[in-house]
Image (cartoon, rainbow, N blue to C red):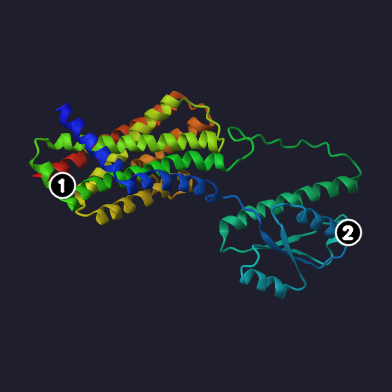
C-alpha cells in the first residue's frame, strides 16, 4: 500500500515539475504578488491634495497654515478664493479635504475667544477621509496648545500622553501585510493546485487509468493530498524567508510552532480543494470553485477588516474559515513570541476543519469512483 501511495505522490510531483509553465506559475506569481501586495495593499494615507479657504489674514491663521504646509502628508495644497471653488474641488474629487478659516479667526484668538476651524471631507472616500481628519486634528491640537501656552506666558506643565507601539515600534505597514500575505498566498496556491488535480486528470483522460488501477479510493486521496501539501509548505517557506530577509520583518516566535500551524492549515485547504476537485468535471469549473471559496475566505479572515467589526450574524461564519486561525498564528510568530496555548487554541480548529473536509472529499471521491 505504501509503495502505491508513494508512486502516486511521485507521479503528481513529476507532473508539476516536468511542466515548465507549472514551475513558473508556482514560483514567479506568488513572489510577485508578495512584493506588489506588500507595498500596494496599505491603509496608510500619503500624498493627499487638500484645499484651504483662508478668509483671515492675521498672524494666527498664517501660523496654522505653515504647520499644515510642513506636513509631509500634504505635498500639494490648493489655496481657494471663495466657497464656490471649494465645492468644485470636492465635487471633482481633486481634493480629499477642504480647510476653512473664517475672517475673524486671528481676532478671536487674540481676544481669548474660541475660534472654529471648519473641515469639509469627501465622504465618498470614507476611510481615507477619516484618517486625514485625524492628521488635521492632531495639527490643530498642537497649534492650540502652543497658542494657549504663549498667551498665558507659562510653560505647559500638564501631563502628556507618551505612546509606545509594542511589536511594531515604527508602525511599519509591511510588518503587518507580509505575515498576512503568507497565509493568503498559501491558501490561493494550495487551493488551486489541489482543485485542479482531479479535474486535470479527467481532461487528460488519465482519470480512467486511476479507476482501473489497484489503488483504493483512500490511497488516491492521500496521493492527491500529499503533493499539494508539499508544494504549499515549500511555497510557505519561500515566502517566510522573503519576509525575514527581503522585507526585514522581525521574527520573534517559534519556527516549529509556525510550521505545525501551517501543516494543519494546508491540510484543511487541501481537503477543501479536493472537495471542489471531486465535484468539478473540468479545470475551468475547478478554478471557478476555488475563486468562489478563496475570495470570501480572505474577506472573512480578518486580514483587511477586523472580525469584531463585522455584523454579529456574520461573525459565526468566520469560525469555519481556516485562514482566520492561521493569520493569528503567523502574525503572532512573526511579531511576538506568541504563547503555546494561543497557538494551540488556533490549531485545534484547523485540525477539525482539515479532518472534516478531507472526510467529505473522500466520501465524494468514492461516490465519483463508484
Quarter occupied by residue 230:
top left
Indicate whether 30 appears above or below 245.
below
**Residue occupying image coordinates x 21% and y 30%:** 6
Residue 303 in sight in this render = no
Q: Is residue 85 left or right of residue 264?
A: right
Q: Which residue is the extreme one toward the right? A: 153
Residue 359, given in percent of the width and then of the height, sits at 20, 37
Quarter occupied by residue 211:
top left
For mark 2, give the secondary structure: helix
For mark 1, give the secondary structure: loop
Q: In this view, does 94 lie to the left or right of 367?
A: right
Q: Mark 2 or mark 1: which comes first in sequence?
A: 2
**Residue occupying image coordinates x 61% and y 64%:** 122
Residue 333 in sight in this render = yes
Quadrant for the N terminus in the image: top left
Q: Mark 1 points at which residue?
A: 206
Q: Mark 2 points at which residue?
A: 59
Residue 343, given in percent of the width and then of the height, sits at 42, 28
Q: Which residue is the extreme one toward the bottom? A: 84
**Residue occupying image coordinates x 11% and y 35%:** 216
Q: Toward the viewer: 328 or 217?
A: 217
**Residue occupying image coordinates x 31% and y 36%:** 229
Residue 269, given in percent of the width and then of the height, sits at 31, 40
Amino acid at each position: 500500500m505504501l509503495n502505491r501511495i508513494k508512486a502516486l505522490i511521485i507521479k503528481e510531483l513529476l507532473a508539476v515539475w516536468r511542466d515548465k509553465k507549472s514551475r513558473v506559475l508556482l514560483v514567479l506569481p506568488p513572489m510577485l504578488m508578495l512584493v506588489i501586495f506588500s507595498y500596494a495593499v496599505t491603509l496608510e494615507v500619503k500624498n493627499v491634495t487638500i484645499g484651504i479657504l483662508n478668509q483671515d489674514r492675521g498672524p494666527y491663521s498664517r501660523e496654522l497654515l505653515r504647520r499644515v504646509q510642513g506636513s509631509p502628508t500634504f505635498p500639494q495644497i490648493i489655496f481657494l478664493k471663495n466657497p464656490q471653488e471649494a465645492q468644485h474641488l470636492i465635487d471633482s474629487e481633486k481634493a480629499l479635504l477642504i480647510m476653512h478659516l473664517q475672517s475673524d479667526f486671528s481676532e478671536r484668538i487674540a481676544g481669548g475667544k474660541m475660534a472654529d476651524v471648519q473641515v469639509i471631507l469627501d465622504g465618498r472616500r470614507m476611510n481615507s477621509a477619516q484618517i486625514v481628519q485625524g492628521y488635521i486634528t492632531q495639527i490643530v491640537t498642537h497649534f492650540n496648545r502652543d497658542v494657549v501656552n504663549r498667551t498665558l506666558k507659562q510653560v505647559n506643565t500638564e501631563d502628556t500622553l507618551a505612546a509606545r507601539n509594542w511589536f511594531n515600534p515604527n508602525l511599519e505597514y509591511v510588518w503587518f501585510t507580509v505575515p498576512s500575505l503568507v497565509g493568503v498566498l498559501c491558501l490561493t496556491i494550495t487551493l488551486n493546485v489541489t482543485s485542479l488535480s482531479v479535474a486535470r486528470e479527467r481532461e487528460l483522460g488519465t482519470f480512467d487509468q486511476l479507476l482501473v488501477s489497484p489503488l483504493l479510493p483512500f490511497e488516491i486521496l492521500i496521493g492527491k493530498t500529499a503533493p499539494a501539501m508539499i508544494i504549499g509548505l515549500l511555497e510557505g517557506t519561500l515566502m517566510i524567508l522573503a519576509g525575514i530577509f527581503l522585507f526585514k520583518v522581525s521574527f520573534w516566535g517559534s519556527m516549529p510552532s509556525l510550521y505545525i500551524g501551517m501543516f494543519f492549515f494546508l491540510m484543511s485547504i487541501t481537503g477543501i480543494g479536493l472537495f471542489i476537485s471531486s465535484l468539478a468535471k473540468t479545470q475551468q469549473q475547478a478554478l471557478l470553485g476555488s475563486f468562489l471559496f478563496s475570495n470570501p475566505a480572505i474577506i472573512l479572515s480578518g486580514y483587511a477588516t477586523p472580525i469584531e467589526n463585522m455584523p454579529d450574524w456574520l461573525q459565526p461564519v468566520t469560525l469555519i474559515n481556516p485562514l482566520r486561525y492561521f493569520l493569528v498564528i503567523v502574525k503572532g510568530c512573526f511579531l511576538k513570541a506568541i504563547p503555546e496555548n494561543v497557538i494551540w487554541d488556533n490549531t485545534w480548529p484547523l485540525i477539525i476543519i482539515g479532518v472534516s473536509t478531507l472526510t467529505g472529499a473522500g466520501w465524494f471521491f468514492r461516490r465519483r469512483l463508484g
